[in-house]
Image (cartoon, grey):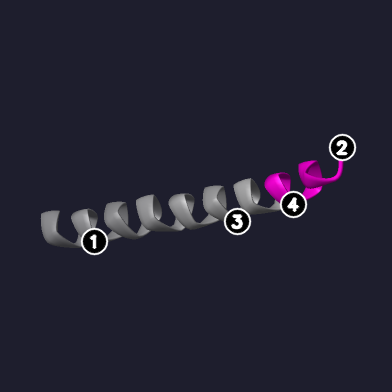
Amino acid sequence: MGPLPCNLWVGLLFKEFLGWLIWHNFYLDSRLCF
């Protein structure tokens, strides 16, 4: 069970990056819509 925390940390970082990317795209879309 050694690499589990590393994978969890990488997964969390990837999820955070994906969430920021989606939020940024939605923000740009809303600005374009307005």
CA neighbours of label 1 inside 10 A, class few (<14), some (14 to 19), many (20+): few
Residue that label 3 marks: 13
Q: Label 2, label 3: how many angstroms apart (C-alpha)?
A: 20 Å
Contact check, label 2 and label 3, Cβ < 8 Å: no
Question: Looking at the figure, which quarter contains the N terminus?
Answer: top right
Q: What are the residue bounds of the magenta stretch? A: 1-8
Residues at marks 3 and 1, CA–CA distance in whole angstroms: 22 Å
Q: Residue at horizontal 22%, vertical 55%?
A: 30
Q: CA distance from mark 3 to mark 4?
A: 11 Å
Q: CA distance from mark 4 to mark 1?
A: 33 Å
Q: Which residue is mark 1?
A: 28
Task: Measure how far apart labels 1 and 2 are at the Cα level.
Answer: 41 Å
Amino acid type of the residue tagged 1 in the rendering: Leu
Residue 3 pos. (x, y %): 78, 46
Name the residue beneath numbered marker 2.
1
Residue 7 among those drawn in magenta: yes
SS class, disc 1? helix
- The residue carrying mark 4 is 6
Disc 4 crowd rating (10 Å Cα; few below 14, some 14-19, many 20+) is few
